Amino acid sequence: MSHYFENDKNIKSDERLTYAKIKNVELKFFVDNGIFSKKGLDFGTRVLLENINIDIAKKSILDFGCGYGPIGIYLSKTTNLQVDMLDINKRAIILAKKNANLNKVNVNIFESDLYDNISNCYDYIVTNPPIRVGKDILYKILFEAKKHLNDNGELWLVINKNQGAKTIIRDLENVYQVKIVKKCKGFYIICAINN
């Protein structure tokens, strides 16, 4: 079985346009097979974006595992901060660039395997992490984020209760100051602060 975090050229494209309204912001997104949430905005990402608290006095955001781009595009639209977006999936990168143009935002989108192509530090790293990559890679995403956060930078993520949210929160508390910002229908919105 192919996953959205792999580059499987055998997956047939079926690109289509979807619409999403987050708070009062209306957005349009092209989605396709071979990416996460190929039918449009997923519930976990929606809850994350409806509850994230970004200080617009800060400077920079990294959307880690951007997929077709809803997190980075929404945050660019609502904050005017510098937004970088990365993914390992080439099809996701193409869609994210197309969607950034469609929604008229100026973001920097690039391919990266984990943090390989990251040299900057950010005030915020925001992710709906790819749980299916397995615990080792998931924990690299979450814990190596610390090296790419400014002092008091914040890692924001959404995790479903059934995907190990309580264990992940406990483990994050070993290296971050952790706040559970919201619980909604089994989804936990977590802010992990780099102190």
Image (cartoon, grey):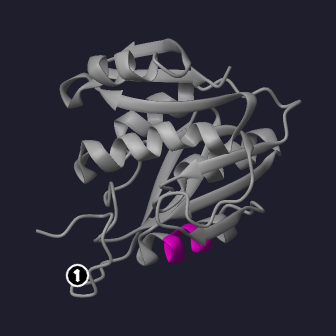
Looking at the picture, tell me which residue is in the foreground, 13 or 85.
85
Q: Residue at x 52, y 77 (%)?
A: 94
Q: Residue at x 23, y 64 (%)?
A: 3
Q: Quadrant of residue 193?
A: top right
Q: Can the viewer see residue 24?
A: yes
Q: Position of residue 8 (x, y in %)?
A: 26, 80
> Magenta span has 78?
no
Left or right, residue 42 beside residue 105:
left
Q: Residue at x 68, y 70 (%)?
A: 101
Q: In the image shown, does 2 or 122 lie closer to the viewer?
A: 122
Q: Is residue 13 above or below residue 131?
A: below
Left or right, 12 with reference to 100: left
Amino acid type at circle 1 is Ile
Spot occupied by residue 37 in the image (x, y as percentages of width and height): 32, 54
Q: For residue 158, what is the image quadrant?
A: top left
Query: In the displayed structure, would residue 61 be above or below residue 57?
Result: below
- The residue to which callout 1 is attached is 11
Question: Which region is colored magenta?
Answer: 93-98
Tell me if residue 96 is in the magenta stretch: yes
